Image (cartoon, rainbow, N blue to C red):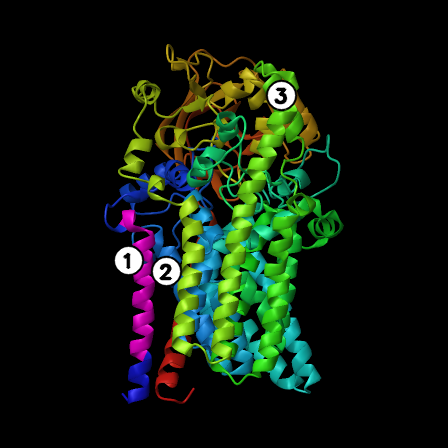
Amino acid sequence: MNQFYRKKIITNLVIIASFVLLLFLFFKPLFIEHKQLIQNDILQSLGMSKEIKDFRVKFGEEPLWTNSMFSGMPAYQISTLYPSNFFLKMLVGVRSIFPEPSGIIFIGLVSFYLMMSVFGCKPIISGLGAFAFAFSTNLLIYLEAGHNSQVLAVALIPLVTGGIHYAFYKNRTRGVCLTACGLALELAVNHLQITYYLLLMVLIQMGIYGFLFIKDKKLKPFITTSLFLLLGAIIASGTSAGNLLTTSSYSKFTIRGKTEINKNLKVESSGLDHDYAFAWSGGISETFSLMIPNFKGGASSRIQEHKSFFKNLKVDYKNIIGQMDSYWGDLPFTSGPVYLGAIVCFLFVLGLFEIKGAIKWFLLIVSIISILLSWGKHFPMLNDFVFQYLPGYNKFRAVVMSLFIAQFTFPFLAFLALQKIFFEDNLASITKKNIFKSFVLTGGLCIIFYLLPSTFNNFFKEGETEELTQLLLSNQFPQNEINGFLTSLEDTRVALFRNDVLRTLFYIVITSLIILAFIYNKLKRNIALNLILLCIIADIWFVNNRFISDDNYQKNLSENYFRPTLADQMILRDTTLSYRVLNLKNPFNDARTSYFHKSIGGYHGAKMRRYQDLIENHISKNNHRVINMLNTRWVITGDENMPVKINPTALGNCWFVQNIKKVSSADMEIDALIDFEPTLTAIVDTSRFRIDFNGTAQNDSSDYIRLTNYKPNHLKYICKTSVESFAVFSEIYYPEGWNVSVDEKPAEHIRVNYILRGMKVPAGEHVIEFKFHPSIYFTGERISLACSLILLVFCGWVGYGAWKGKI
C-alpha cells in the first residue's frame, strides 16, 4: 500500500473516530449510564408489536398478522422481518454497534461524509458538513419523538444523490453501484414518505443534469448512464420486494386507500382526507426558524421552561406569563423548530453566489420546493393542486415533513461553498462581494427583525387572544387588566424572539469575519477552518440541548412503562382463550393496552379504512351492538374505585345467526349496524358478495361453535349444528391472505357486519380453520433474495475492480 492510500485511510479513520466521539458526548446517558432516551413512538411500537415478537420467539416464524390492535390487522407496518433482504441486515448490524438510537445519527454522519467526499470535498469540510446534517435540530427532535425510521430514511438520502452525481460526472460504474446500494438501504428502512421526497429530488436532479448534457451535445452518455442507473434502481427496489409488495397490497385497505362510504364525501379521493393530511402545515413566516430557532418560540412548552431567559425576565404578571405557551406558530403543537443553524443558512446563501453549475440549481430548486410544500394549507395555490393531481402525494400526512429536504440541501450547498472558498482557486475580490451580499440577506434580515419585530412576526397564534381572554375571565381575572396581561405576554415573546435574533446575528458576523480574515491572509487556512468548526458545533449543539437534555433519558424505561396496572392484572386473570379489551382512556391513540391485551383500540398511522369507519360511526358513539360483536369482554374505565368492568354481553369468538340482512352498498351496510341484533342477524353487502343462505330455523339447543386453538395467524374452531347454518366470527375480514377450510377442505368466507368474517357451515360436526398465508409476502421474499445476491455480487465486482484500478 503506497503512502497516499495509507494517509487517506488514516484520515478517514480519524474522521470516523471523531463521529463516534460526538455521539458519545451528545448521547452520554446512553453510553455511560445505560439509560434509554424517552421516545413515545418507540414505546407505542413496543406495545403494538408485543404479540408479534412473542410469536416470533416461540415459533421461529413471522405471524404476519396481529390481533392485539384495532381488533386485528396485518403486521406488515408494525413488525415484520424480511430475512432475504441483506441490506436491511446491514442497517440492523451497524445500528446494533451503538446504543439505540444513536446508531441512526452515526449512519447519517457517514452517509453525508461519503457524499461530500464524492463531490471532491476535503475531509474536514466533509466531516463538518456531516455534523451539520446529522445533528440538525429537527432530526434529533424527531428522534426524541421516536420516529426512528423517518430519521434513518433521511440519513441515507446523501448516498443516492451522491451516487447519481458520481455516475454522471466521475465514474459511471462506481456511481451506479453507490446509487443502487444507497437506494437499497433507503427502501429497507420502510419510510415511504421520505423515499417519495427522495424520488422527487432525484427526478429534478436527473432533469437538470439531462438539460445540461443535452445542451453540451452529450445526449448519448446521458441516456446510457440513466439506463444503467434505472437498472440499478430496479435491482435495489427488488431487494425490498417483500416489504414493497405487502405494503402495496395492504395500502388500498387502509385510511390511505379509497373510502367506500359516499355519504358526507366532498371530493372523491383514494388517499387521506385533505384536512387530516394538511393539519401539520408549517406557517409561511415560520420558515425563518431554519435560521432563528425561536422565531416562533421554539417548542410547545411553558415560557418558564426557558430557565435563564425567564429568570431575568422583568414583566408584569410574571408568574402567570411563565405558565403560558412559548410557541406561537401555526402548527397545532411542536417539540421544536426545524433549525438548520445560523452559520449553515449564511453559508447556503453564500453558496448561491459562489457555486456554479448543475448542482447549485438542483439544490436551490429542491430547497424552494421543499419549503413551498411544507406550507401546506397556507399555500393552497400549489399544495391543493399537488395533493389532488401528483400521483401518490395524497397518501402522506404532515406535509411540514418536506422540510427534511431542506435539511439535506442547505448543509450540502453550504459546505460546497466552504470547500470552494478555502481549497479552490478563487478571485478574492468576487468572494468579498459575495460575503457582503450574503451578510445583507441573512445578517441584515436579522437586524430588521430585531428593530421591527411585529412587522414580520405575529406573536399570537390564530384565535389565541380570544381563547386567553375567555380563559382569564373564567378564572376571575379582572377584566380591566386583560389587555395589560396580553401586552405583557406579547412583550415576553418579543424578548424571547429578539434574544435568538441577536444570537443568530452573532454567529453570522463571526463567520463572516473569519472568512474575510482568511481571504485577507490574516488567518491561516487551518486556524480559520477550526474556528468555523467550533462555531458551527457550538451553534447547533447548544440549540439541540434546549430540546434534548439529561431529563429526556430514563433508566429501565420500558420496564416502568409496561408495568401492569391493577386493571391489567385483573384482566390477565381471565384465562378465556381469546377476548378483547376496550380502554376508555384515549383508546385510539394508545398502544400500551396492546402490550397486555387484544385491544379494540390502538395507535397506528395506517389502520384499516373500514375499521376507521367503524370507529367514527359506531365505536366512538358507544354503539354496544358493535362493541359486543367485537368480543369486547373487558372495559378499562380509568376509575380508581372500579378500574375495570366485565362486559357480560360480549358475543364471544363466534356464533350462529338465524337471518341475513342484505344491503346493496357500504353506506347501507354501516348504517344497518345502528339498530341490528348481532346475535340473530348478519349484514351482507350483496354488491360485493354472493350469498345463497336465506336464514334458518332456530338452532338446536345442543348446537355449538367455539374457538379451540388460538394463534394470531391460525384460528381453529369446532362446531356442531343440526342444520345448515351461518356462522359469524368476531375477527376482522381481510381478503388478501386469510384462507378458511372445513375439515381440511378449502371453503369460502365473506365479509359481514361491515368488518367481520362470516361463512355458511353445513350440518354436522366440523373443524373450521382460518390460516393467514399471504402469498405476496413469500413471493416478495424470493425476489428480495435474488436481487440482494445480484447487488452484492455487483458490489463485490466493483470493489475488486476499484482496488485493482480497473474500474
Q: Position of residue 579 (x, y in %)?
A: 40, 24
The answer to whether residue 529 is left or right of residue 245 is left
Which numbered disc covers residue 12?
none
Tag in front: 1 or 3 = 3
Location of the N terminus (image quadrant): bottom left
Q: Is residue 339 visible?
A: no
The residue at the point 49 percent across, 41 percent down is: 335
Tag 3, which secondary structure? helix
Question: Which of marks 1 and 2 precedes in the sequence?
Answer: 1
The answer to whether residue 561 is left or right of residue 591 is left
Q: At label 2, which amino acid type do we have?
A: Phe
Q: Mark 1 = which residue?
A: 97
The residue at the point 35 percent across, 29 percent down is: 596
The residue at the point 65 percent across, 60 percent down is: 368
The residue at the point 55 percent across, 82 percent down is: 169
Q: Mark 3 = which residue?
A: 481
